[in-house]
Amino acid sequence: MNLIDYAGNVIRLTDERLAHIKEHPEMVINTAKINEALASPDIVVKSKTDEEARLYYRYYEGLSIGNKYLCVVVKFKEADAFVVTAYFTDSIKKGDVIWKK
């Protein structure tokens, strides 16, 4: 499926990647939040370990696992962008801020 991020980039989410993401039990009922985090993130950070990766963060309160950021990792290749993974976390990783709400 194709998703659109805050900047209008088309980002692919393959069935294989979605299955990987759903291996995290807390993500099974929260997969719709992936689209929300891409379309309306709180902050987007460039990965320090992968030049092609961007980390989209959106904060959620009242989750079954407490208040957390959803981090969606997107890899940007020449003419392609795709979701690598998505997970909940307590903090935003350090890196160059690409965009902030």
Image: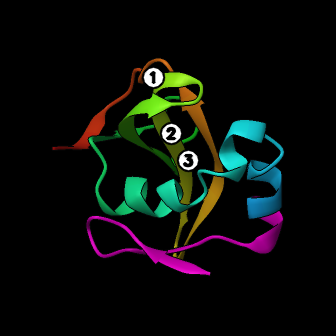
For the record, the magenta segment spans 1-17
Q: Amino acid at mark 1?
A: Lys
Callout 3 touching callout 2 (CB < 8 Å): yes
Nearer-N-terminus badge (3/1): 3
* Quarter of the image that includes the C terminus: top left
- Which amino acid is tagged 3? Val
- 10 sits left or right of 101 in the view: right
In the picture, the disc for residue 93 is: 1
Mark 2 is surrounded, within 10 Å at the Cα level, by few (under 14), some (14 to 19) or many (20 or more) other residues, namely: many
Binning the other alpha carbons within 10 Å of mark 1 as few (below 14), some (14 to 19) or many (20 upward) gives: some
Q: CA distance from mark 2 to mark 1?
A: 10 Å
Question: Can residue 49 be seen?
Answer: no
Q: Relative to the observer, which residue lies in front, 65 or 77?
A: 65
Residue 8 marker: none
Label 3 to label 2: alpha-carbon separation: 6 Å
Q: Which residue has dot 2 on it?
A: 71
Ranked by sequence position, the earlier of labels 2 and 1 is: 2
What kind of element bears circle 1? loop
Tell me the SS state at disc 3.
strand
Residue 78: image location, x then y, percent: 52, 72
Residue at image coords 37%, 74%: 9
* Residue 3 position within the rendered picture, expressed as x and y whole percent measured from the top left: 48, 75
The foreground one among 68 and 16 is 68
**Residue in the image at 78% along x and 72% along y:** 15
Q: Are the residues flagged by discs 2 and 1 in contact, CB closer than 8 Å?
A: yes
Element assignment for label 2:
strand
Residue 62, placed above or below residue 77: above
> In the rendered image, which residue does mark 3 sit on?
73
- Which sits in the foreground, 48 or 21? 21
Quadrant where the N terminus is found in the figure? bottom right
Residue located at (40% from left, 20% from top): 94
